Amino acid sequence: MVELSARVKTMTSSPTLKLVQIKKQLQAQGKVILDFGAGEPDFPTPENIKNAGVEAIQKDFTKYTPTSGIAELKKAIRTAYLAEQDYEAKDAQIVVSPGSKYGLFILLQAVIDPGDEVIVPLPYWVSYPEMVKFCGGAVVFADHLKAQPAFELTAASFISRCTPRTKAVIVNSPSNPTGMVMKGEELAELIAFFHKKNILVIVDDCYRKIMYGAGKYPPPLKLVPAAHEHVAVVSSLSKTYAMTGWRLGYTIVSEALAAAMTKVQEHSTSNPCSISQKAAVEALAGDQGAVLAMVEEYRRRRDYFAKRVDEIGRIAYALPDGAFYFFADFSHYIRRKKFQDDNQLAMDILEKLNIILVPGSAFGAPDHLRISYATSMQDIRAGLDKLEAYLRHDG
Ligand SMILES: Cc1ncc(COP(=O)(O)O)c(C=O)c1O
């Protein structure tokens, strides 16, 4: 076999995408799986967005587009962003990509040199460390596992990890896996600090429209006006509009960085899918009723989950403010059932109950499990009934 590159040899596969494969295999064997592992909405893409995609095909909007996105979509992004965050972006600051994952990837490719350090939150979304390593960068963790209140995202946790080699910081709010939202004053302190050191602050806000508190999302590009050239916002339509398969995300950065990212995209994917871009225009500019309805349903599920998990007992968690995940400490049950770690517990639950949960180790947090409530209330009830009986039973 041809020798693989050193870069790819050290890369691990995505543990969450692996679970999707396991689920498909088990379903093919005729098993009924309750999937609490999903990182995507269980809702279909709203009708008006699907129709815009169909119309794009029928009108033959099926060719290459400008690399960083069509003007109509950039306008919709600018307009939505201005209304929501009172920040006026220029078209030249926007790069539309096939998913925010790819937006983040080309952003890191444009900024990180071998040996540069990137501060990443712990627990982390699975792709951050791998992407940083792929650029030759070194991952430095800002630990939120021992934070009080649990998992709180503080400026101090990131600032304390800054060294002369720090090139970028990744903030993920609302967080996958914890659902925590960073407070505006903390984010402002963080941005002000790193801006003075010429370090880029990347804010992955792909769950920002899925929030349960009364407060508004703190606008990263507005918080410290002088610092906006040191802030990159990486956004997604995947979760908000149930559009994971359409692969559509966008980044708002300085014009210089946008031009650099566009070069990388030009030579790798050319452009995001033309049809998805037309659908995205409808998503951003059209009726937002479906989004509000989905968020209300997530809230109902979250509250039900919290009630049931409290009844089971001895599972520590922080009530998520956003996204659609519970991140809970199962160490009591791991010990009681004499398992070595969270991986063994998750595997036993899968084998005995046909329930998929993601081991916390995948996010750098052993002893935890991530439970997604992007699944139907019916499945949540059935799954929690089974889980409760299983956890109460010794052995
Ligand atoms: C924190 C976070 N960022 C980015 C992404 C990527 O989303 P997409 O590439 O679908 O826009 C995900 C997807 O799970 C995520 O959880």
Image (cartoon, helix red, strand yellow):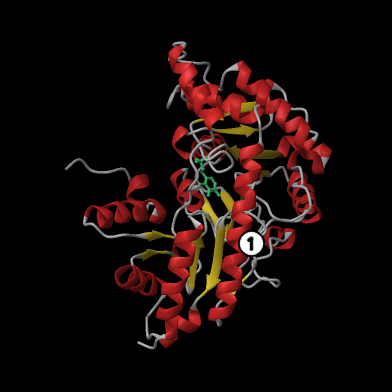
Where in the figure is residue 94, as x and y percent of width and height?
64, 27
| Nearer-the-camera pick, 51 or 53 | 51
Where in the figure is residue 183, as x and y percent of width and height?
76, 56
* Quarter of the figure with the C terminus: bottom left
Q: Is residue 143 visible?
A: no
Location of residue 37 by image quarter: bottom left
| Nearer-the-camera pick, 159 or 303 | 303
Q: Looking at this rendering, what residue extends furthest in the top direction? A: 59
Residue shown at the point (25%, 54%) measured from the top left: 25
Where in the figure is residue 187, as x and y percent of width and height?
75, 52
Classify mark 1: residues with Cα within 10 Å, few (<14), some (14-19) or many (20+): many
115 relative position to 222: left or right:
left
Location of residue 7 by image quarter: top left
Q: Amino acid at mark 1?
A: Pro
Question: Which residue is disc 1 drawn over?
Answer: 320
Q: Looking at this rendering, what residue extends furthest in the front direction? A: 378
| Residue 213 drawn above or below residue 352 | above
| Residue 54 drawn above or below residue 14 | above
172 relative position to 126: left or right:
right
Where in the figure is residue 337, as x and y percent of width and height?
39, 85
Q: Looking at this rendering, what residue extends furthest in the left direction? A: 1
85 relative position to 133: left or right:
right
How many labels were placed on the picture?
Answer: 1
Residue shown at the point (21%, 57%) measured from the top left: 29
| Nearer-the-camera pick, 332 or 290 | 290
Residue shown at the point (83%, 38%) measured from the top left: 225
Q: SS of the residue at dot 1?
A: loop
Q: Is residue 15 visible?
A: yes
Residue shown at the point (55%, 43%) measured from the top left: 239
